[in-house]
Image (cartoon, rainbow, N blue to C red):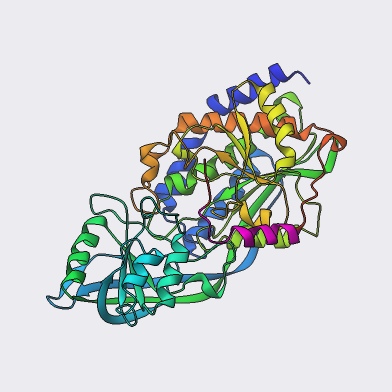
Amino acid sequence: MDWHSIDRFLIGEAWAGARINAHLTMLCDTIGPRWASSPAEWQTVNYIREQFTASGLVNTALEEYSLKSWRYTAATAHLVEDDLAIHLLPFNRCPPVAVTAPLVDVGFGTPHEIADQQGKLPGSIAIMALVFEPFTPPMPLSARLAALAHAGAVAAVVVDRKDGGRVEYHSAGDWIDPGPDEHPLPAVAVSRETGGRLRKRAQQGGSLHIQVMSEFFTAPAHNTVAELSGSIWPAEHLLLGGHHDTVYGTPGGNDNASGTIVVLETARVLARLQQELGISPGRTIRFATYSAEEQTLQGAYAYVAQHHGAEPAPRLAINLDELAAGNMKGLVLAFPHLRPLIQQQFDAMGDGLTCHVMAQLDYSSDHFPFIRAGIDAAFLWRWRFAGRHADSDFHHEPGDTTDKVRPRELKEYIGQLARLLLRLSYIAPAAWPVNQITVPAVLARLERERGQVVRVA
């Protein structure tokens, strides 16, 4: 393989042939918020399939599954004593609630703070900071909300960390094992400024009325898939994917039009290599976009359930999420056995990229269903780490618009991922370290790590 010429082509096509701005306009401006199970999501998946087909990929498909979805029609609150309206957002997938109760300030929601308010919490609405208490062992938000529910609180008001009246959608549950405890109690988010006002009222013995009108329902949703067939080991494959859905009310430029676009463009660039230079991948490269990442990763779970077991698992599944948060630094693997192999490819590419291994099994995005199934999975070393762009803080809110996405950096991602995937596709099966991870071992590790705050750097 003349990797120098191949790299020149892939990098050049990633830059000169880019359709990033057209995709951004369609996904974020024309379609807009893409809540899974909505008509906008249906428009999205058809657009993605059309783009895969136009690029010349094969086996393009929409894979339907049954989504346990949610919607809300109203979320209001007011301070009872002076009937002052309070702006809030319900937590993602918040159950319906209509309650009037005393406000109790529990600080950061740590065990000692909950114990201090133990006598006041039954039947109350607790107000709690989203961030961790300084100098104390960090507790996940889900664990703190569960502790409040156990102490008798009937609802929680969570104070966002952002300034300027901004507030975003959050999730309440432990996504290590989403299920009956997805929502230990109804929870809503308020801005930092509103939180300060509510804390003062709590000290004065004030009460709050909260109403969230919401419902859970089942509806069809769709993942998308497409392939470039391998020329040597077509039955084996690598997988590049990312979610196409958003939370309510956000155009989702960073989260996750950025990842969706890099899936589309990496597929296009590799297809152009095949069309113009006749170079196909050695093993099949599959591309996918997942539905309902924002709804407990249900789309990725559906993908794994449909494909894992019915066919060989991918040699590696790479997940792309929030790529507008900073430049690519490398790859983060769930399991360590592929680390030397990946690092060899990075060294050959000469971009200074590094391969790392998760200290804990990260459950924050669509790589996690693959990890639970014992499949080698990874995400990119970039967002949430050192060097994060300030614009990426517009997350799960209407400000996550197209201007938060840097097309130049996405071009770098596309070129680097195309080069990495093509190199991996030509590594002979005998040279791949054997994945000896078992599902029982993964589940046992997850149980040991339950309640920990996942280390991300």
Front-most of residues 113 and 443: 113
Q: Which image quarter holds the N terminus? A: top right
Left/right of residue 38 with respect to residue 316 in the rendered view:
left
> Is residue 190 highlighted in magenta?
no
> Residue 207 falls in which quadrant of the image?
bottom left
Classify residue 156 as left or right of residue 231.
Answer: left
Percent position (x, y) of residue 52? 63, 44
- Which segment is the magenta one? 439-453
Query: Residue visible at 67% across and 57% down?
Result: 445
Q: Nearer the viewer, residue 193 or 1?
A: 193
The image shows a total of numbered marks equal to: 0
Outermost residue, right direction? 430
**Front residue (pair 299, 366):** 366
Magenta residues, dominant SS class: helix
* Residue drawn at the location 18% of the way across and 76% of the way down: 205
Query: Is any part of residue 247 visible from this angle?
Result: yes
**How far across and how far down the image is residue 198, in percent?**
21, 66
